[in-house]
Image (spheres, rainbow, N blue to C red):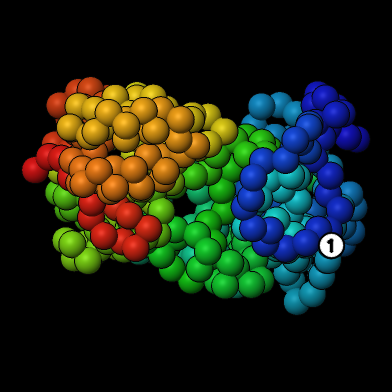
Amino acid sequence: MGALNYPMAELPQTSPATPGRKPGRKPDGELRRGWTTGACATAAARAAYEALLTGEFPDPVAIRLPRGQRAEFALAEKKLENGTAMAGVIKDAGDDPDVTHGALVQATIAPAPAGTGVGFAAGDGVGTVTLPGLALAVGEPAINPKPREMIAAAIGEVAAEYGAEPDITVTVSIPGGAELAERTSNARLGIVGGLSVLGTTGVVIPYSCASWIHSIHRGIDVARATGQDHIAAATGRTSEAAMRDLYGFSEQALIDMGDFAGGLLKYLRDHPVARLTLAGGFGKLSKLADGHLDLHSGQSQVDVARLADRLAAVGADENIVAAARQAPSAGAVMALARESGVAAELAGAVATGAREVARAVLAGASDVEIIVIDRDGAIVGRAGF
């Protein structure tokens, strides 16, 4: 049984792969899709539960995904002893630069008291929720609602097939997950001890950026739930560090926005905080000032002609403005502004333009300031508050 309703060209492969690839530029050509940690945990749990009932592990094991497709997973390990069963699946994220690519996802099934149904526990490398604001209560293992639903459905199918009552505890583990989690925003969200088991469809779409935007939204949820009335969103580490130094923000008040200004602002419009500080480099924020909400170079470009117009508006010499119109980058325009003695004015104009765009998206939900940061972490332009 394969993934019968899924186009073969898009089928994720389940062979072992190199753990923890680093994000990079999106490669050219058709990209291979992968599996979420939730799908891997579901496959491992189904295989382990069937082994607990029958003494035999199905390998490969087939599961049904939330949108109705069926998918098969090879088992990387299996163990049946002392009244429990454990199976493991290697996560293949396809061509997505997922931090959990190549990780081993294990599910251990143990009997639970009659009438308790399917329960969940965090094993090695899976975190525990410690702050409010997420979809899970404080103290719960960081196995998200949709993966829990997928696992429970798969367990129910096996129980029905063999006439069993599915009163069990499913412990999900990701060995090495605590180290991998250091490369995620989990600690900031109050998830300690390891990774989250995620996935709403079971399928990873390479470079869809859905997980990053999801993290932005959960960061806002946690900030609101922990009483933060002023948060900072930054395009990168230098800008974030500058905001931490400026305001003394707690971890829960800091949002790693990256290039996704639209994902941040639109969510804040419906889930507001009193004040937002949005910080970034001159080039990124010049794109926001021009109305772009996705600041990635693949989605928006610096408009040097607009920057030249801003230079003229702040009083730069005509020769400087003319040179700016031919400049190859935002950095080159800023260098010309420094030469003309109007760098602070140009950065301030960009900050003002970016604030106008942000305020329009927020529609009054939050007050916002924009801070332009240079490569050394210094504030070079500011608008708002």
Residue 277, given in percent of the width and then of the height, sits at 21, 46
Q: In this view, does 173 lie to the left or right of 70?
A: left
Measured as percent of width and height from the top left, residue 63 is found at 76, 40
User: How far across and down, in percent of the image, does residue 67 sit?
Assistant: 66, 27
Up the image or down, 70 lies above or below 116; here it is above
The residue singled out by tag 1 in the image is 76
Near-viewer residue (22 or 69): 22
| Front one among 369 and 109 | 369
Residue lying furthest bottom in this view?
82
- Nearest the viewer among 108 and 277 is 277
Residue 166 visible at all = no
Q: What element carries label 1?
A: loop
Identify residue type, mark 1.
Answer: Ala
What is the crowding at mark 1: few (fewer than 14 residues within 10 Å), some, or many (at least 20)? some
Quarter residue 250 falls in: bottom left
Q: Is residue 323 above or below residue 37?
A: above
Name which quarter of the figure residue 2 lies in.
top right
Question: Would residue 52 appear left or right of 113 to someone viewing this image?
Answer: right
Q: Identify the residue at image location x=42%, y=43%.
A: 332
Residue at image x 69%, y 58%? 21
Relative vertical location of residue 28 with respect to residue 67 in this rendering, above or below: below
Q: Answer with the quarter of the image where residue 247 lies.
A: bottom left
Q: Which residue is drawn at 41% across and 64% down?
A: 187
Residue 154 located left or right of residue 62: left
Q: Which quadrant holds the N terminus?
A: top right
Asked if residue 2 is positioned above or below residue 21 in the image, the reply reads above
Is residue 270 toward the left or the right of residue 51 in the image? left
- Residue placed at 83% from the left, 66% from the top? 78
